[in-house]
Image (cartoon, grey):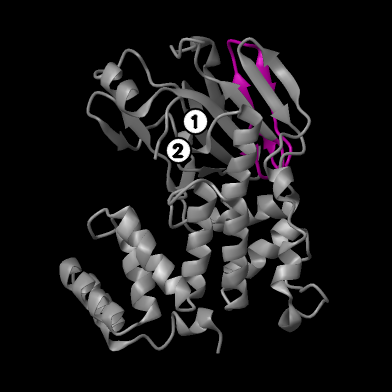
Amino acid sequence: MSVAATETVGLSPDVARADECDAAGRHTEAINHLVAGVKQGDIEAYTRLGKRLLVGDRAPLLPNDGAKFLEDASARGGGEAAALLSVLFGVGARQQIDLRAALASLVLAAERGWLPAREQLRILAGAPAGTGVGGDPQQDDWRQLAARVDLKMWQTAPPATDLSTEPLIRSYPGFVSGPVCRWLIDKARGRLSRALVYEALIKEVTVHHTRTNSAAMFSMLETDLVCVLTQARMAACLSVPFRHFEAMTVLHYDEGEQITEHFDFVDPNVPDYEREVAQRGQRIVTFLVYLNDDYAAGETDFPRLGVSHKGHSGEGLFFVNALRDSSADVRTLHAGRPPVSGEKWIVSQFVRNRPMF
């Protein structure tokens, strides 16, 4: 049986009891059971405890401790833990960004049977889905497949075309491949919820009639190396450090759904604007990746600039939301127009002028 199977089937008594406690809302007890499992050397307990502490999921937010538990789980042979470590290496959560270490950790996860790691390697190497290096999925040489992954490409901006120079709107027609687009759609499908709007006056995110589409945000636990490399290529296009990126979000528009005209910068008219910008920075850039194009209408529209653009599958596009002094550029008013048939999938990535993590 593969490690991927043993980490989710036949749970140890400690992990099973942790699940029971979580189901009853007794999360502190659940953590205590996971700690007991760790003391018994249980890989699944290490992994689950690491995940919870990493993002503060029904647990204290202790990212360094969480990462250490994941490192221990991987050292003991954990497949999922190795895949999660590939993300931490890729985003520089523990040290400097190291994409080679990230890829090597993904290989470990694949060798241990973690199926999402295997599929990511196939996508990144340009291999057909469900096949191995030699065509036999049981005989894959995952290291050989990883050697095909062009990390330099992911750190290099592709050819671009400017749709506007002032403010800058730049398109990259060949930003990502079709398999990457399909992977991102599949990651988001099933996790979608109604997209929310931040209400500055009450300082809460809420449902609003101006935004009727749905969205799936990828937290540190929900992202993967395909997402991280996509963001790395964005960073190369922008010459902005990766740490300035917010969490990646995939937006979905069904027929008739839209985001009406709005701005992406932090609105200087809202209360506590100075504090928000001082603490988290200004949203200076929005980067979009169009994941499909088999829909009608649904353009990204900039009415004050006379630019209306229907992206093609695999195309990247960014626009600059702020002026040189980081103040709001109101010319960037834009909307996600509704598709009149079909459904639209698109990545939305906000970039700040200061580190986010």
Instruction: Specify the quadrant that holds the C terminus.
Output: top left
Pointer 2 local density, CA inside 10 Å: few below 14, some 14–19, many at least 20: some
Q: Is residue 170 left or right of residue 200?
A: right
Instruction: Give the residue at x 47% y 44%.
Output: 214
Confirm whether residue 350 shows in the render.
Answer: yes
Q: Quadrant of residue 280?
A: top left
Is tag 1's residue or tag 2's residue first in the polypeptide sequence? Answer: 2
> Does the stretch in magenta take in 36?
no
Distance, label 1 to label 2, CA atoms, is: 6 Å
In the image, the segment drawn in magenta is 289-315
Find residue 39 and report its horizontal and vertical position in percent. Answer: 27, 81
Q: Residues within 10 Å of mark 1 (few under 14, many from 20)?
A: many
Q: Amino acid at mark 1?
A: Val
- Would you place residue 134 above or below residue 107 in this image? below
Q: What kind of element bears circle 2?
A: loop
- Does 293 lie within the magenta span? yes
Tell me the residue that label 2 is attached to.
246
Residue contact between numbered discs 1 and 2, judged by CB atoms under 8 Å: yes
Q: Residue at x 31, y 22 (%)?
A: 278
Left or right position of 304 against 310:
left
Q: Position of residue 336 (x, y in %)?
A: 56, 30
Q: Is residue 255 visible?
A: no
Kindly give the residue lying farthest to the right in the view shown.
134
**Which residue does the numbered mark 1 point to in the structure image?**
351
The answer to whether residue 51 is above or below residue 259 is below
Under mark 2, the amino acid is Glu
Q: Position of residue 78 (x, y in %)?
A: 48, 76
Q: Is residue 166 above or below residue 53?
A: above
Q: Residue at x 35, y 14 (%)?
A: 268
